[in-house]
Amino acid sequence: MVINYKTVSIFQRAVFNYLLFSIRSNIYHKRGEYQKALVFYNKSLQLYSKKIYHKQIARIFNKLGQIYGKQNDFLFSSQYFLPALALNRKVKDRFGEAETLYNLAKLDSLEEKYDVALQTAKNSIR
């Protein structure tokens, strides 16, 4: 199916663009092509930031944190996980909150902060 871009609403275009960016970023992420994934996650983030879609922004922050964690940039990684956690709590997304806490626990473990990792992991399943 081909979509005629001229006949859809601005919101539908934004959703369509987000989906395209999301698919591309996820594929690059899974392939380990992190720089390309970062480009498309950031494009998705720009789209959602305009309309303040907190749940989607939190999801993208989580993905960005994962990429920086895989690149061993733990400080930058946590700078994405922490706002993701705050946004998930703001919109009461328990699954998103648990996923972010899990990612923070993994990050703490990689940094050999085992006690913090255990506590964060416990918090993710309460």
Image (tube, rainbow, N blue to C red):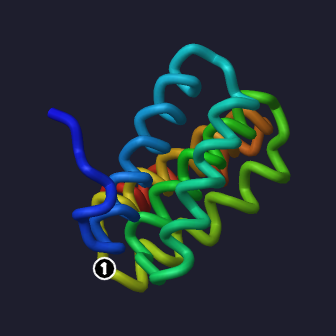
Q: Position of residue 9 (x, y in %)?
A: 27, 72
Check the image and report above or below for 67 versus 60: above
Image point 57% across, 27% down: which residue? 29
**Residue lying furthest top in this view?**
31
Q: In the picture provided, is 67 more to the left or to the right than 89?
A: right
In this orientation, which residue lies closer to the viewer: 86 or 59? 59
The quarter holding residue 88 reads: bottom left
Label 1 CA crowd tier, 10 Å (few <14, some 14–19, many 20+): few
**Residue lying furthest left in this view?**
1
Identify the secondary structure beneath mark 1: loop
In this orientation, which residue lies closer to the viewer: 28 or 100? 28
Q: In the picture provided, is 113 more to the left or to the right than 40?
A: right
Residue corresponding to mark 1: 92
- Amino acid type, callout 1: Lys
Q: Position of residue 56 (x, y in %)?
A: 41, 64
Location of the C terminus (image quadrant): bottom left
Check the image and report above or below for 43 versus 94: above
Q: Position of residue 83 (x, y in %)?
A: 62, 71
Image point 84% across, 39% down: which residue? 73
Image point 44% across, 76% down: which residue? 54
Image point 41% across, 76% down: which residue? 53
